[in-house]
Image: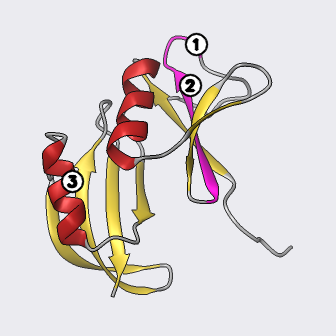
Amino acid sequence: MKIRDIDHITLTVTDLDATLRFYHEVFDMPIIESDDGRQSVLCGKQEIKFQLIDHPHKPLAGVPTVGAADFCIIVKDPLEDVKNHLASYYVPLIAGPVERNGAHGKMTSLYVNDPDNNLIEVSEYN
């Protein structure tokens, strides 16, 4: 088997409107809608799907939990610009900038939480 990519991840959330607004406004991810009316956001070539804690989509993980995700997005902008952008939306930094190892080498990262306390690592490769 040869794995090519990750297509999407699904986050369990408490408030879909607040979540869509956060990812769209703060990270400028376009909101997309599937044929069944489900809304998600486009993150580069991948999709971040959302399911409400009280209305999960089947099949589902063993125990869908709000705030359990921890994922990394890669930005093209300098991290100092990203830091200023996050501050303009009153998104507090959890940590960073810090040096990390990513899938393709050394990177510098900032950490923030989304409205459900999922941890988002925002990184640029060095």
Q: What secondary structure predominates along the stretch shown in magenta?
A: strand
For disc 2, the marked residue is: 51
Which structural element holds mark 3?
helix
N-term-proximal mark, 3 vs 1: 1
Residue 45 at what x, y percent from top left? 64, 59
- Using residue 38 as the reference point, say whether residue 98 is left or right of it: left
Asked if marks 1 and 2 touch (Cβ < 8 Å), the reply is yes
Quarter of the image with the C terminus in it = bottom left
Q: Is residue 52 magenta?
A: yes
* Numbered mark located on residue 55 in the image: 1
Q: Residues within 10 Å of mark 3 (few under 14, many from 20)?
A: some
Quarter of the image with the N terminus in it = bottom right
Q: Is residue 61 magenta?
A: no
Query: From the viewer's perspective, is residue 84 above or below residue 123?
Result: above
Q: Nearer the viewer, mark 3 or mark 1?
A: 3
Residue 114 at what x, y percent from top left? 31, 38
Q: Amino acid at mark 2?
A: Gln
- Using residue 120 as the reference point, say whether residue 58 is left or right of it: right
Q: Amino acid at mark 3?
A: His
- Using residue 106 as the reference point, say whether residue 87 is left or right of it: left
Residue 109 at what x, y percent from top left? 27, 70
Q: Nearer the viewer, mark 2 or mark 3?
A: 3
Span shown in magenta: 45-55
Asked if marks 2 and 3 touch (Cβ < 8 Å), the reply is no
Which structural element holds mark 2?
strand
* Numbered mark located on residue 85 in the image: 3
Whether residue 114 is visible here, answered yes or no, is yes
Residue at 43 percent across and 19 percent down: it is 17
Find the distance from the CA under tag 1 to the CA under tag 2.
Answer: 7 Å
